[in-house]
Every structure is written in C-alpha cells, then in structure tokens.
Image (cartoon, coloured by chain):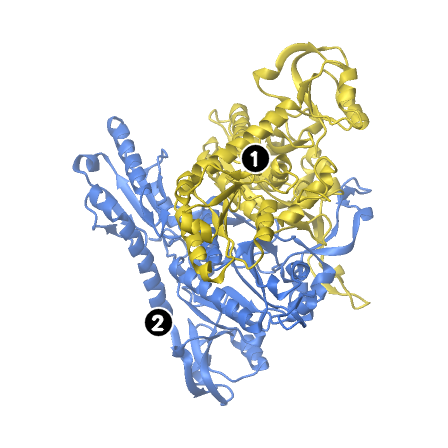
Chain colours: A yellow, B blue
Amino acid sequence: MSTTAITPTRAEDFPEWYQQIIRAADLAENSEVRGCMVIKPWGYGLWENIQRQLDRMFKDTGHRNAYFPLFIPLSYLEKEAAHVEGFAKECAVVTHHRLEAGPDGRLRPAPSAQLGEPLVVRPTSETIIGAAYARWVQSYRDLPILINQWANVVRWEMRPRLFLRTAEFLWQEGHTAHETREEAIEETEKMLGVYEQFVREHLAIPVLTGEKTANERFPGADSTLCIEAMVQDRKAIQAGTSHFLGQNFAKAAGIEFTGRDGTRQHAWTTSWGVSTRLIGTLLMAHSDDDGVVLPPRVAPTQIVILPVTPKPESRDAVLAAAHALAATLRQQRAWDERLTVEVDTRDLPGGTKNWEWIKKGVPVRVEIGPRDLEKGTVAVARRDAGVKEKAFPTMVDFTAGAVALLEEIQANLLARATAFRDAHMVRIDSEADFRAFFADQAPGGFALVHWAGTSDDENRLREELKVTIRCVPFGDAFAEQGTCLLTGRPSARRVVFARSY
Amino acid sequence: MSTTAITPTRAEDFPEWYQQIIRAADLAENSEVRGCMVIKPWGYGLWENIQRQLDRMFKDTGHRNAYFPLFIPLSYLEKEAAHVEGFAKECAVVTHHRLEAGPDGRLRPAPSAQLGEPLVVRPTSETIIGAAYARWVQSYRDLPILINQWANVVRWEMRPRLFLRTAEFLWQEGHTAHETREEAIEETEKMLGVYEQFVREHLAIPVLTGEKTANERFPGADSTLCIEAMVQDRKAIQAGTSHFLGQNFAKAAGIEFTGRDGTRQHAWTTSWGVSTRLIGTLLMAHSDDDGVVLPPRVAPTQIVILPVTPKPESRDAVLAAAHALAATLRQQRAWDERLTVEVDTRDLPGGTKNWEWIKKGVPVRVEIGPRDLEKGTVAVARRDAGVKEKAFPTMVDFTAGAVALLEEIQANLLARATAFRDAHMVRIDSEADFRAFFADQAPGGFALVHWAGTSDDENRLREELKVTIRCVPFGDAFAEQGTCLLTGRPSARRVVFARSY
C-alpha cells in the first residue's frame, strides 16, 4: 500500500501523477468537448490571483485593458503569410450563423445561413487588433499604443493536457504599437522582465530569459523572447513569450502614421502573453507525492483553520475561537493584500478534512481543539515542510508570526525550485555526452551547449532525441567562447537544450 | 451653430445622439466583424469597475467563480426543447478545425477537417454547465452548487447597437443547483436583489423588479425575474435577469442526487446574468447633450486635474502642485475604494482638454494655474451640474470635501434619474388612453395598467404599438384591484408596458 496521498508518485509516472494531483485538488477536469477543460473554483481562484496581480504590473508599466472581437475574418489572417502558415492547422472555423431542423428532424447548420466569409475563432489577436490600430493611428502623436486584453483563445490541440495544452485557454495578450524600432524592442524586453519577475516573485519559480531560435519563433515575429521554467521531471515549460514583430503586422494591417519628419511610416509593434499554462507550470514545479503545493502569494486560501470538536459541550467555544482567529488574521496583509483565511466547519472527520487541504495545497493548516482553548495553543502545519511547525507554540505567537510564515514558505519554495533547476542544468561539451544526457531512459535536464548548427540540425535532434533549443539565454553566465558540439564552429554563447511540454 | 458638444441632441435624434456620445467619449466602436464591437480602454475601464464591484457582491453571497468551455456540442443544446427553439436562430456554428489552401490558392475550411458534430459558440451556458453539474452531484450533500462565470457569449444579432445588442458581448452568468424548489426560488430572488442594489447604488439608476410574462421568459425557464430601467427617451432596458429553471435543465442534463430520504431526485437550478448592456443602460440614463455623464462609483477616473501652464517660468510649480494634489486625493477612499485621479499633462490647449473630459463624463474636473498657486485656490467643475462648483474656494477645502462631493454627485444622478422615471411612469386605465400614450409621435413612457390578456393579446399590441409587458412588478405599489383595460377581466396587480431596447 502506498504511503503517499497520490498514486502514482512523481518518480513512478510523472504525467499520470500530474493528472492525479489536479483531480485530488479539484482544480479542473476535461469536458466532453474535445480538448476543452472545465476550470473548477479552486483552479479558477488561482487564475484570479494571477490575473489580478499581473494586471497591476501591466498598469504600473503604463498599459490599459481593452477588448477585441472573438472572431477573425479569414482574409485578415491571410494578410501575414508566416502567421497564417503557423495557425491555419489548428483553427476553429465558424461557417454558419443559424441552426435549423434537417430532413431527419435533427438540428444542423442552416444551409441558407452560411457565412460569405468564414470566421476563425481567435488563436491570437495580432490581425484583428492590427486592423483596429490601423484605424486609430494617423500621426506619431497617436503613439505609443499600450493595450492589453484578457481573453479566451482557441487552438485545436490534438494532444491536450489540462492547463498546459488545451484547445481553449485563458490568457492575456498585450499588443503595442510604437514610433521607432528601438522603442518597440525596449517594450518587448520590458514585458519579458515583468514576466520573469512575476513568475519568480509570485509563483516562486526561477526562469531563464532568452531568445528563441528561428525554429521556435512566433509565426510572423522578427524575434521571440521567452521565459523557460524547469519542472520536476526536468522538462522545460515555456511559461511566457514576448514578441518583437518588427513592421510585419503593421504592413499587413496598414498601421501607418505621419512621422515627425512628415513622411508616412509603418508602426513597430510587439505582442506578449501568458496563459493558464502558468497554472500547469506551478503545479509541476512545486507539488509533491501528497498532492498540490501552492505558493502562498497566489493560493486561493493561504491559511485554513480546522476546528477539532470531539465533544458537543465544547463545540461552540472551539468554533468561536476559530472564527475569531480567522478574523484577526484577515486584518493582516502579506504582499500588500489581505490574508485569505478559511474556517472549515464541515461535519466530516478531522483526518478527511486535513488530507483534503493537503491535497489542495493550502500553504498553512491550523488545528484548534478544546485543549488548545484551555492552554492558548494551536497546532500549525506548513504544506511545504510536511511536519508540524514548532515555531508557534501559542495562538498569540501564531497571530504575530503568520505573515512572516507565509513569506518564509514563499521563499522556501523559490529556493527549493532554484536548487532543483540548478542541480539539473549542466554544461555539456561533446556530442556523445549530449546524446547520453538525453538518452531514452536518462532523466535529462537543461543542457547548456555551444551551438552553431542550422535549423535542419535542430530538426534532426528534435526527431532523434525529442529535444529542442528552449532559448539562447540572456545574461553573462552564458556568454563564453567555445565550439559547437555538433559542427565544431565557433560559438560565443551557450544555448539551452531540453525536452519540453 | 450648435451650442452643445454633441450633435444631434437627445431631443433631435436619440439613437444617433447615443452613437455620437460613444464616439466622442472614445468608449467603443464597431469592428469590421459584423455585429462585434471593440471596447476601447475608457469603455473597458467602466466594465472593469462593474465587474470588480459585482464580483465582490457575488462572493459576499457565497458564490465562487469557475470557467466552462466556449463550445457547446449541438446535441447538448437539443436536450431542452424550449431552450434550443429560443437560441437556434442566432447561433455561431463551428464546423471545421483546420484551414487549407483551396484550388484557387485561397484559404478555406479543410473538407477533411469537418467536425463529426458541429459545435455552437455559447449563447448562454445552461447546457454545458448542466453537463458538468451532472458529473459533480451525487448526493444532497453535494448541494447547493453556487458558481458564477465571467465570459464572452455570442448571439447573432441582425440589428446590432453598441453595448445594447452586439453579436459578441461580455457578461457574467451565475448557475446554481439546489436540493429543493424553495431554495432555488430563494436564490433566484436573492440575485435579483443583488442586481437591483448594484444598479441603484453603483450605476445610480432606479429599476423596477418583477417577473416576465410567458412571452418574454428565458427559453427553458419556469420563471424569469428581471430589472427594468427607464432611459431618457422613456424606453425600457432589461438590465438583468434571474431565472428559476425548475427541474427542466436538471432533467435535460441528468443532474440527479440521492436525497435525504434515499430517493433519486432531480436538482432545482437557477441562472442569472448581467452584461456589457449595463454600460449602454447607464450611458442612456445619465448622459446629456455635451456627452457622457458617469456615476463616480464606476467612472474609470473620478477626478481629472488640468494644470494651466500659460508661462514657462511657472510651469514646473503648477505641475508639481497638480501631482501633489493627485497624490493627496489618491490616499482617500470613497465606497471603500481609493479615489481614482488623473493629471492631464498633455501639451494641448486647455479648452480642448477640458471638453475632452466633459465628453468622456469624468465626474469632477479641477483646474490649477499659477494664480491658484499664489492664492491657494482651485477651480472645481462637476460634470452633473454643468457649472463651476463654488463650494470649494481653496485647495484645502477641496481636499477635505472631495469624497463628499463624489458621494453628492452619485446621489444627485440617482435622484435625477428617479425623478425622470417617476415623471414618466403613469397609471392608465382605458384602452384609448393606452393607445394615445403609445401613439406614433407620442413620447411614451412606462404605462402601469391592469392586465388579464393572453399571449396573443400581447403579441397583437407588440405588432400594433411596438410595446411589450416589461414585467409584472413586485411591490405593494402595484398591488390593487382593477379590470384589464383590454378584456375587462379582473386584475389584482398592474403590469408595466413600454417600448424597449
């Protein structure tokens, strides 16, 4: 019999473990609509926190929200050749605007209500937003435009996986237009920085920042920057991207302005996005064989209070103490937001309730029983440590230390994820070592290698070893002279190879 | 030459005036996708405030958010006969999941990627959410389920109008399932109460609450409750609905549970929603011939500060004072949220900027110039009054009184809208008077009449006079004995007839 709450464990079968922790935490489930998920309240609560906190960062960097149509006319998509090439294979296409009963009495799309031009459900909104910007921009005075949209998008996925790859997903997409190339590049880099900071400080995950090679670039972009996280099976997850689109989409959509020198010019645009994929990333980065582990900063509930009421005569007093503690804690703030505290008064066995919250990943659990009331004590357990916390013998101690405890858990998760990532990110300098590192049964990780190969070389390695270049990472740590392990050509910077989701 | 900022005025051409105030305030625009709008930042800012404030009220009444698929299999929609009958005529239908180049080289839906079962873009989510609840509910212990979703929905509109009637719109839809009929009815009424309170206290619009007749009922509901607002052309707008769905959708979707008595039973469900239509309602309720007028509680910016900088030598001091005032105001709270204040430092003529903010409907404008700095004064203008506010001769007075001023403006807008509505809501007791009230050139309004007619009678009046029963209103004010003005049959309560959007 297993001694963990989740079967199988991470070591036994990582992909199945991932499905099981999501089920055990009641985060989401597959719907009967192929590839589309239902995000349940505990999972959506995570997304609400991510959304609110990121939104604040977008507004602090000068962006405002707006909303653009769900449907994109086919002809818009066609305007940018690389873009349509990249998305045509996975588009949901609306062809009719009415249903009617067919000859067999069953409903069917009404033949008389066929659209003159099919509409595509947005897989991303560069083209439809570009058409709006073309209307809005006349002069350099109308620039920059700094807009973000929170929305659902659809990409028909053949192999869906909850949160990580679903046909419909929720995301934000920033779309900006600028007067100069330099400003647009600055924006692209700035928003990558926002993502890196958010994922590190809020989700407690360290990420590499870098640039994609041409193979992995966004269809239609001049360059794609990304943040890459490592999760516990040592695979990479692209957790966010920021694209410098050059003038490609401005030319396709006609975003033109009269410049300071009186000439007509095309704007320079960017786009950047993160999605519900962030939830999949954090689940795979932090959770353990007892279920989900959530960073306090984004947990829907940070502290759950479990009243222990063995005897009817002390029940009211225990419940009153539990609610009083909750009220006191809710007055406090961590990361400039009020603590979120729940009192679980359900009439279920204490062990059942305790394990439910463990599996849900709530950062701190507090038990209060009749004896605690007598002695002024509480029993505190932290989800990241798996043992009872001894630092708070009394309720007074806990009330005074709760915020610091949450901060400590947040810091511990980041430290743990960073140590794991660093332990499995290795410099590799020969093709043989590289092939051994990514051999069939080998655990793999992030391979930092010198690279001067071609796109075809990348494709071949992808076929043979199922690995791709996740990014050409930024930072001095990766800048060094060397020779490409495949071609022997000189290289001035290491790239990161890994298997990925 | 017109003396108003908007042409035409409300009196001259109300529908065109409505289009023009939206354009002048830069709230939204039509997209090239038929019936779909682009919500621009100022309009979306309104929606964000509505969303955040309503969300708080939903959570305070025990609801949590979740997210369900955008696509509904055709077969789900067919399960509830009245429901599909109501929505089949206006559905966007997805039939393919890939594009490819056709014989002419142009993109087309790939014939090989036709879906086995077409998918409908959700016009509302009772059926897809019902399918999930059927999975989740086994026992009475699993009830109630109290869930809300913020989402986009699509209903193919033949005569779209910005915010009021668009093919795609944003909304929230609450979906709850209960053990008993009584509980479900209580929920339906409770959420109608939340809507009434929100629209009155936050949007400053008085609404009638009541029940729809069978003619206007939600397709598939046992009863539909609604809130009905009157706007300035005296037409009605249905601003929100709350449906008691009986066991209809539970039977269609199979939401069954084992009850306390051990028998298998169908759940009782409700659904309730408001949408971006609320924005259209508030625009038509409060705005004037100079443009939009916004209630302070939902205005994206409550106070705009306009620095007057005629001379370069005093420019820095004026800007510093403007920013200092903004910082002081932002420390204050109205309705438990921080004041939103903007300093407009754009290098444009003062009159241009002032009129822009008038047209945008910002509740309070404050001018600060070099002479104000010397004398410690400010010039305050309130949007609802159209004259300079004399109550705050000094900057100190204004800082101390800003919150009260916003509260006063909010109260004034509600009082004004209530007086207008009450002045145009009249008791009518003969068919002749009724026909005169709704004659072609007559201004109309809300006609309170005794009614005991049939659905056919309602349909005939709709054809002849373009009026419908907006609701059978709740409240003692409408309970009185009388006789139906059409049939002469006895009636115990007046109903409300009006033209509507």
- Check the image and name the residue furthest to the left: B375
Of residues B302 and B293, the one drawn nearer to the viewer in this rendering: B302
- The answer to whether B237 appears left or right of B133 in the picture is left
The percent position of residue A324, horizontal first and vertical second, equals 40, 52
- The answer to whether A55 appears left or right of B335 in the picture is right
The percent position of residue A295, horizontal first and vertical second, equals 54, 38
Of residues B236 and A434, the one drawn nearer to the viewer in this rendering: A434
Q: Are marks 1 and 2 in contact (CB under 8 Å)?
A: no
What residue is shown at x 61% (from left), y 66% (from top)?
B140
Q: Quadrant of the N terminus of chain A?
A: top right
Chain containing mark 2: B
Q: Which residue is mark 1?
A: A255
User: Dot 1, crowdedness within 10 Å: few (<14), some or many (≥20)?
Assistant: many
| The quarter of the displayed image where residue A153 is located | top right
Residue B423 - label: 2
The percent position of residue B82, horizontal first and vertical second, equals 66, 70
Chain containing mark 1: A
Q: Quadrant of the C terminus of chain A?
A: top right
Q: Amino acid at mark 1?
A: Ile
Q: Is residue B441 above or below residue B34?
A: below
Q: Is residue A415 above or below residue A64?
A: above
What residue is shown at x 59% (from left), y 37% (from top)?
A274
Looking at the rendered structure, the number of numbered marks drawn on it comes to 2
Q: Amino acid at mark 2?
A: Ala
User: Dot 2, crowdedness within 10 Å: few (<14), some or many (≥20)?
Assistant: few
Instruction: Report if residue B377 is visible in the image.
Output: yes
Q: Is residue A218 above or below residue B226?
A: above
Regarding mark 1 in the picture, which secondary structure is present there? Answer: loop
CA gap, disc 1 and disc 2: 50 Å
Regarding mark 2 in the picture, which secondary structure is present there? Answer: helix
